Amino acid sequence: MTTPSTLATTVKAARRALKLKQAELAAAAGVGIRFVVELEAGKPTVQLGKALAVLEALGLECRIVARSEAQAGQGRP
């Protein structure tokens, strides 16, 4: 992921796949519903710790890799 928009799309899709309402996800992650709304809207200044808590509640994780490794994994030069 390289943009807040990409993270937003991923979070929203995962929440919907789990058939969770935003309020349910917020409760599971220990964050406020407003935070989930802003995260799913792609707000670029959300708090990292809270975003990671939301990802964990969705069964997702964030990994940091060098761009050269990420591109190689996608079949790019």
Image: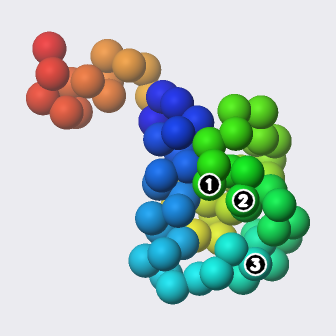
Q: Nearer the viewer, residue 39 or 65?
A: 39
Q: Which of 14 and 74 is in front in this view?
A: 14
Badge 2 crowding class, 10 Å Cα cut-off, few under 14, some 14 to 19, many 20 or more, is some
- The image's colouring method is rainbow
Instruction: Name which residue type carries label 1.
Output: Glu
Residue receiving disc 2: 37
Instruction: Name which residue type carries label 2.
Output: Val
Q: How far apart are marks 3 and 2 (CA)?
A: 9 Å
Q: Which of pointers 1 and 3 lies earlier in the amino acid sequence?
A: 3
Residue 57: x, y in percent? 65, 71
Are circles 3 and 2 on residues that touch, CB within 8 Å? no
Q: Which of pointers 3 and 2 lies earlier in the amino acid sequence?
A: 3
Can residue 31 be seen here? The reply is no
Dot 1: what SS?
helix
Q: Distance between the residues labelled 1 and 2?
A: 5 Å
48 lies above or below 40: above
Residue receiving disc 3: 23
Dot 2: what SS?
helix
Q: In which quarter of the image is the C terminus?
A: top left
38 lies above or below 64: below
Q: How far apart are marks 1 and 3 (CA)?
A: 12 Å
Residue receiving disc 1: 40
Are circles 1 and 2 on residues that touch, CB within 8 Å? yes
Dot 3: what SS?
helix
Residue drawn at point x = 19 percent, y = 33 percent: 74
Instruction: Name which residue type carries label 3.
Output: Ala
69 lies above or below 35: above
Residue drawn at point x = 42 percent, y = 20 percent: 66
Residue 40: x, y in percent? 62, 54
26 lies above or below 11: below
